[in-house]
Structure formats: structure tokens, C-alpha cells
Image (cartoon, rainbow, N blue to C red):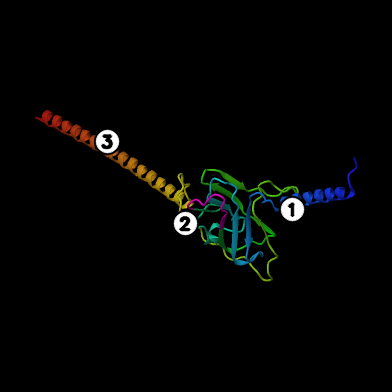
Amino acid sequence: MSIHPVARTGRRIALAGAVALTATLALAAPAAAHAEVEADTPQALAENVTLSFVSEAESSSAGFTQLRIVLPEGIAPGDVTLDEAPKGWKLKATDDGYSIAGPALNAGVDAEHKIKVRQLPDAKEIAFKTVETYSDGKVSRWIELPTGGQEPEQPAPVLKLKTAAPGAKPVDPSPSPSTAESATPSPTPTPTAAESDIAAADSDTDAKAAETDDNSSTGVTIGLVLAAVALLGAGAWWLVQRRKASSQS
């Protein structure tokens, strides 16, 4: 039984349409969750730059509670101030960057925040390794950098920079950040350099005090020995004098 030419043509059109629809749906499908960064002035040595971060949600049952950002070389934690963040979220400086945390976001809601950076480094591109924590304890680490031309599975957000403007120079380093703005105290806080110095100073003071006590104890002991020797000497002299007096009588 032969297929009518019109039917054959219609079947081909239907097949082509199905292929096109499949391709369209594939292109329209959401990409895998990831973290991104953008800048209002993506240029080396640019000052007072606003960086916008987006961490795409990948959980349907838990929301973000914290983001941990490792700053690239050339940006100190003290160079960063919070510009925008989810309601109730606070920024806290860390040794190598900052963390931003607060009440859990709704499941499926992206975590977006902005920071203002004092100055961008003189580089072609900079990476901001990001660690995301969800309310159920799940952790996503977007910390991998491209190697050997291969795109990593968990790429860190990378910002490409234009060449520095003519005459642009690095500004003076910022002072060390204060940890007084902490919003979520760490259950096992790491001592800061200042705290370590204070602890070392206290230890040194205790050692000196102990040394002073030891010296004082030694001095008292020597004094008692000398006093005892003096008393013995005085007693011996008294006996000698008495014997002399008796013999003369």
C-alpha cells in the first residue's frame, strides 16, 4: 500500500516541526545554578566601584542563609562596604574576604547583594570564590578556576577588567577591618591578630609576675638564712666572752 504524496509531505512537515520544537525547548530550559558578579565600572584601578553578586538558587526545599566570598588579591576586607542585601542580612569581614548572612530566603529565591569596593586591582580579570549555605545545611562551592582551557563544573564568579585609565594609580592600603559589625557570631571564633597579641602580652605579664614572686621568695629565704647565721654568731661570741670572764675570776 503506497502512501499518498500529500500524506508523505505532511508527515515530513510534522517531523521537522517536532525537531524544531525540541530544540526550542532545550534552548529555553533553565541553565544550571551558578554564581555571577558584575561591576558598574569594570576597569582596572577604578575607584568606588559597585559590584553586584547573584547566587542562583538550586534547592526547591531550602533557602540561602549565608554567602562566603573570598576576595581576589588587591582587594582587602577593609576595602569593602555593604551597599544592598536581602532584608536582615549583614556583612562581616573575614581574614580573606567577607561573609554576608541573615534570615533564610524562600526556597527558589536567588541571593543577590551589592558591595562597594574602594578600588579594583590592576589586573585583566579577578575571581571571587563563593561558598553558599542553605537553611538545610547544604553547601555549594563555586570556587573552581579554569585550567588548561577546560571550563570547570563549579566555576568561581570571574570579572573581566578593562585596562586602567591613563594616570590611574593604586590608592593607599586600607586599615584593618573591624569585626564589631558581626551579625552572626561564629560558634568557634578564631582569635584575631589583636587578640593574639593581647593573649601573648598577658602571658608575658604572668611570666614576669611569676618570676618576681620567685625572686621575692628567694630573697626571703636568703634573709632568713643570714639572720640565723647572725644569731648563731652572736651566741658563739657570748659564750666565748663568758668563758673568758670565768677563767679570769
Q: Quadrant of residue 209?
A: top left
Front residue (pair 191, 160):
160
* Residue 31 image point, x, y percent: 67, 51
Asked if residue 105 is among those painted magenta in the image, a careful observer would answer yes
Residue underneath mark 1 = 24
Front residue (pair 170, 140):
140
* Circles 2 and 3 in contact, beta carbons < 8 Å: no
Q: Please tell me which residue is depicted at 81% across the width and 48% down the height of the picture.
A: 15
Asked if residue 23 is among those painted magenta in the image, a careful observer would answer no
Residue 62, placed above or below residue 247: below
Q: Which residues are magenta?
A: 102-112
Q: Please tell me which residue is depicted at 60% across the width and 46% down the height of the picture.
A: 141
* Circles 1 and 3 in contact, beta carbons < 8 Å: no
* Inter-mark Cα distance, 2 to 3: 71 Å
Q: Amino acid at mark 3?
A: Val
The answer to whether residue 179 is left or right of residue 149 is left
Residue 72, placed above or below residue 225: below
Residue underneath mark 3 = 225
* Residue 177 image point, x, y percent: 50, 58
The answer to whether residue 185 is left or right of residue 125 is left
Q: Quadrant of the C terminus?
A: top left
Q: Which SS class for mark 2?
A: loop
Residue 50, placed above or below residue 152: below
Disc 2 or 3, which lies upstream in sequence? 2
* Inter-mark Cα distance, 2 to 1: 40 Å
Count of numbered marks: 3
Residue underneath mark 2 = 88
* Inter-mark Cα distance, 1 to 3: 102 Å
Q: Amino acid at mark 2?
A: Gly
Q: Which SS class for mark 1?
A: helix
